[in-house]
Image: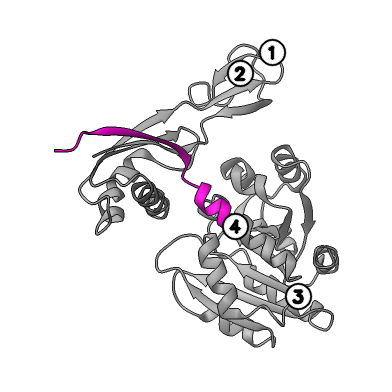
Amino acid sequence: MDKLRVIEIKQSVFEDNDSQANALREELKRDNVCLLNLMSSPGSGKTTTLTRTIHTLKDEMRIGVMEADIDSDVDAHTIAKTGAKVVQLHTGGMCHLDADMTRQGLEALGTEDIDLAILENVGNLVCPAEFDTGATKNAMILSVPEGDDKPLKYPLMFSIVDVLLINKIDAMDYFEFDMEACISRVKKLNPNVKIIPISARTGEGIDEWAEWIRSVVAK
Amino acid sequence: MHELGVVIEVVKTVEKVAVEQQLTKIDTVILQIGELSSMIPRYVEQCYPAAVDGTILEGTNLKIEVLPGNALCKECNKVFNLIQNNSKCPHCGSNDFEIISGREFFIKEIVAY
């Protein structure tokens, strides 16, 4: 019988994914493709925001979308109507995408004729924050009906994003949402985050959001 | 139940180590989970058998060590436990702090033949 031994690993569980994500980010940079990872809870308006974003920017840049969901392809059909290139990814029960799944998605999408690839991550404020997808930039949508306390409850998500869209501001009158308190909670977690209040329904704030996208795609 | 996806990451890492170190049989996997990480030790334990099914880790034991969620108070510079003190410094009452530990999710070591 061989001798039992203890092997020290002392490795973060996320290390393997992190190194794959960094490799993917480098490749995308080399190929001049900007990958935007869009995260939020279910029902915050990711698909509606994307539809409006594509309509605003489609004459200036070539956009491809990866729709990630546990099941169904309803979002992919909605996005396909905009004329943008789209693929549906099924995570098969998994609540997030990792760098390897993102790479497979990009291969399915084909990035040779794309300037901006948008990954619509699984609707969830917990796990997607922990797995680096390899994206160039991370964006998040918080919608007014969810409440201004979400930065307190899901601090990691708010601390890793480059830009935060606060959506459904056209419904501010119907909810007790304290915009100032929300912004100060987010800034405490993430002082450098860009915050843009928008309404995907009316189009308010979309110009500023489009401008932010132009600035990251141009880099 | 995002623990499952994370435990699958554990399996991938340990499989790599097993090949590198030419291990024949793994007995126990020891994880370190921070109190402030979004992983719940009880759920990790529950999904472990399903995550390792059909892999090199099938039938192995799992041990979990919990690491404390500590913070450094920015007002009085003392270290305190965030969970026990409800995210408020027990020395000066400030809630301005910097997290210094508790977000970890490490594979600490494995016991193997």
Which residue, given by chain and number where applicable, does mark 1 sit on? Answer: B76
Q: Write down the region rendered in magenta.
A: A1-20
Tell me which chain the residue with mark 3 is part of.
A
Q: CA distance from mark 1 to mark 2?
A: 9 Å
Mark 2 neighbour density, 10 Å: few (under 14) some (14–19) many (20 or more):
many
- Judge depth for marks 3 and 2 and give the one in front: 3
Rendered position, A213 above or below A178: below
Q: Are marks 4 and 2 on the same chain?
A: no
**Are the residues tagged 1 and 4 within 8 Å (C-beta)?**
no
Element carrying mark 1 = loop
Question: Do marks 1 and 4 both belong to one polypeptide chain?
Answer: no
**Which residue was labeled with disc 2?**
B89
Separation of marks 3 and 2 at Cα, in angstroms: 48 Å
- Asked whether residue A17 is drawn in magenta, I would say yes
Q: Could you tell me residue B96's position as x and y percent?
A: 69, 25
User: In the rendered structure, which amino acid carries the disc numbered 1?
Assistant: Cys
**Chain under callout 4:** A
Nearer the observer, disc 1 or disc 2?
A: 1
Direction from residue A19 to residue B32 in the image, left or right:
left
Contact? badges 1 and 3 (CB < 8 Å): no
Please name the amino acid that badge 4 sits on. Answer: Ala
Please give the residue where the numbered disc 3 appears in the rendered image.
Answer: A115
